[in-house]
């Protein structure tokens, strides 16, 4: 592996750094965007049951906000119990915007790495081509410099694509996952508002 890095020349180092960052972000998002962590099963039903038993109190709201992103959205509605439906929905939408932003954390960085990796690989290709042309001289061709130039060009191109392809796949997957979570949170928040305003029993 180290011999490949040496053969790829100095342009491979930015690509290696980008690959390490991309892997770290993918692992972090895989852990953070687990469904059980974002949308715990039965949370809405438990919140409604607890509200009917003892109403709303600060300890309940604090515990709910710490539990999950869905809990943050539902607690925003519970904080405005007794207000009009419009005020409750506005507070839920504001909390939902904050939660959605948090769920999308690092996705811009991952998408940027996936987009620029082929360009970084192309830059390495250009550097390799410059070395290939530099190997030509009036007295003949320098085989060592020619071989090194070809290695730099090919390794950097390949490594750029190796980073970009999985990076783009995971970026699109995480974006779709977040969009799905946000829609489900909106649906559950609407159900909570309908229960709190007496429009729905459960």
Image (cartoon, rainbow, N blue to C red):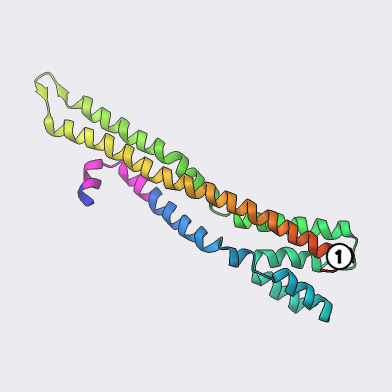
Residue 13 is one of the magenta-drawn residues: yes
- Residue lying at the far left in this picture: please name it: 139
Residue 37 is one of the magenta-drawn residues: no
Examine the rendering and report whether any part of residue 109 can be seen.
no
Q: Start and end of the magenta stretch?
A: 4-17
> Mark 1: which secondary structure?
loop
* Above or below for 4 versus 53: above
> Where is mark 1, residue-wise?
200
Task: Judge left or right: residue 93 versus residue 144.
Answer: right
Q: Nearer the viewer, residue 55 or 11?
A: 55
Residue at x 40%, y 48% (from the top left corner): 18
Q: Nearer the viewer, residue 7 or 71?
A: 71
Task: Judge left or right: residue 98 versus residue 197.
Answer: left
Image quarter for residue 20? bottom left
Task: Judge left or right: residue 157 versus residue 28.
Answer: left
Question: Few, some or many C-alpha atoms within 10 Å of disc 1 (few <14, some 14-19, many ≥20)?
Answer: few
Task: Locate the C terminus and report the quarter of the image it occupies.
Answer: bottom right
* Above or below for 176 versus 153: below
Residue at x 49%, y 60% (from the top left corner): 28
Residue 29 x %, y %: 52, 58
Residue at x 59%, y 67% (from the top left corner): 36
């Amino acid at each position: 592996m180290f011999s490949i890095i040496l053969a790829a020349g100095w342009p491979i180092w930015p690509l290696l750094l980008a690959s390490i960052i991309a892997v770290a972000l993918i692992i972090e998002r895989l852990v953070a965007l687990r469904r059980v962590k974002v949308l715990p099963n039965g949370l809405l039903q438990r919140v409604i049951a607890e509200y009917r038993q003892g109403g709303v109190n600060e300890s309940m709201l604090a515990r709910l906000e710490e539990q999950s992103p869905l809990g943050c959205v539902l607690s925003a509605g519970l904080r405005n119990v007794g207000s009009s439906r419009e005020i409750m929905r506005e507070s839920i939408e504001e909390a939902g915007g904050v939660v959605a932003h948090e769920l999308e954390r690092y996705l811009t960085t991952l998408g940027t790495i996936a987009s620029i990796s082929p360009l970084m690989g192309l830059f390495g290709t250009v550097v390799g081509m410059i070395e290939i042309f530099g190997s030509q001289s009036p007295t003949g061709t320098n085989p060592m410099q020619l071989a090194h130039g070809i290695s730099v060009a090919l390794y950097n191109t390949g490594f750029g694509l190796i980073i970009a392809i999985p990076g783009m796949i995971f970026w699109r997957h995480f974006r779709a996952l977040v969009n799905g979570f946000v829609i489900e949170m909106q649906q559950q928040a609407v159900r909570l508002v309908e229960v709190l305003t007496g429009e729905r029993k459960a």
